[in-house]
Image (spheres, helix red, strand yellow):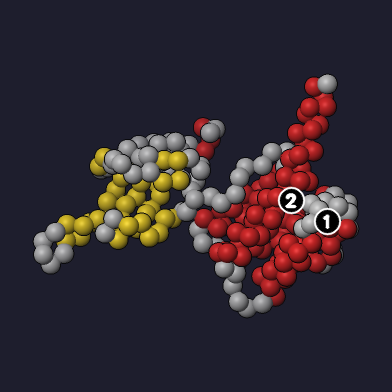
Amino acid sequence: MSMENHLNGNWGNLESSKNYSYICGFCGAVAGPAYRYCCKYTTSDGKSHTNGNIYLCPTCNKPTFIINNFGLEIEQVPGPIIGENIEFLPDEVGQLYDEARKCISVNAFTSSVLACRKLLMNISVSKGAEPGKSFASYVSYLEDNHFTPPGSREWVDHIRKKGNEATHEITSMSKEDAIELLEFTEMLLRFVYEMPGRMTKHIQIK
């Protein structure tokens, strides 16, 4: 991880933490933190319980809030970042992809779907589609020009429908909607950018 993503400085008034790990929502590392802040309370029988912790990631030094209920984790903020890193993306496309991933980690599911919607439009234009067209036409362009993998027609229709719902319907998108669209987008980004980029690298070696 680059040092520019590391939070400089030292946290104070911490206590040590053992035998607990989580996936950091900032850097994606599997964190086994050494320190934490605790939110504790005492029940009527005089017993002390912890119902929330702020853990510090040893990789990026950034805090993650985790709510506990008698030892069971019920919420993490920010949550784990969904999706994988992808190589050879144009800068604007890469920034939008990261934005869509981070929106899911903070439960902003409709925002993630809208970011993916814009991302599919940007991919189409980068591959020759005319700017200023409808979202449905951009998805069709990707399919008609063979930028989508074979056998993905049903996925394409599903993404077209969900993208339009996120923009024009009142109902918000669910976590399942956001993850499905992100997974499709991730597959498309690998197909359009990463795999050709890797092959170019091997051709240059020859």
Report the quarter where the C terminus lies. top right
Q: Residue at x 36, y 40 (%)?
A: 33
The answer to whether residue 153 is above or below residue 65 is: below
| Residue 91 numbered mark, or none | none
Given residues 144 and 93, the one toward you in this image is 144
Name the residue type under label 2: Leu
Q: Residues within 10 Å of mark 2 (few under 14, many from 20)?
A: some
Q: Residue at x 69, y 73 (%)?
A: 165
The answer to whether residue 151 is above or below residue 62 is: below
Give how far across and how far down residue 80 sits, in percent.
Answer: 49, 50
Give how far across and how far down residue 21 sits, in percent.
Answer: 38, 43
Q: Is residue 97 visible?
A: yes
Taking the image as shown, residue 20 lies to the left or right of residue 175, namely left
Which numbered disc flags the more N-terminal residue, 2 or 1? 1
Taking the image as shown, residue 89 lies to the left or right of residue 82, namely right
Q: Which residue is mark 1?
A: 142
Q: Quadrant of residue 46?
A: bottom left
Name the residue type under label 1: Leu
Q: Which residue is mark 2?
A: 188
Q: Are marks 2 and 1 in contact (CB under 8 Å)?
A: yes
The answer to whether residue 38 is above or below residue 109 is: above
Q: Quadrant of residue 9?
A: top left
Q: Residues within 10 Å of mark 1 (few under 14, many from 20)?
A: many
Give how far across and how far down residue 30 sits, in percent.
Answer: 45, 41
Q: Is residue 124 visible?
A: no
Secondary structure type for disc 1:
helix
Hey, which residue is sitting farthest front in the picture? 151
Hey, which residue is sitting farthest top in the picture? 206
The residues bearing labels 2 and 1 have C-alpha atoms spaced at a distance of 9 Å
Q: Residue at x 75, y 33 (%)?
A: 198
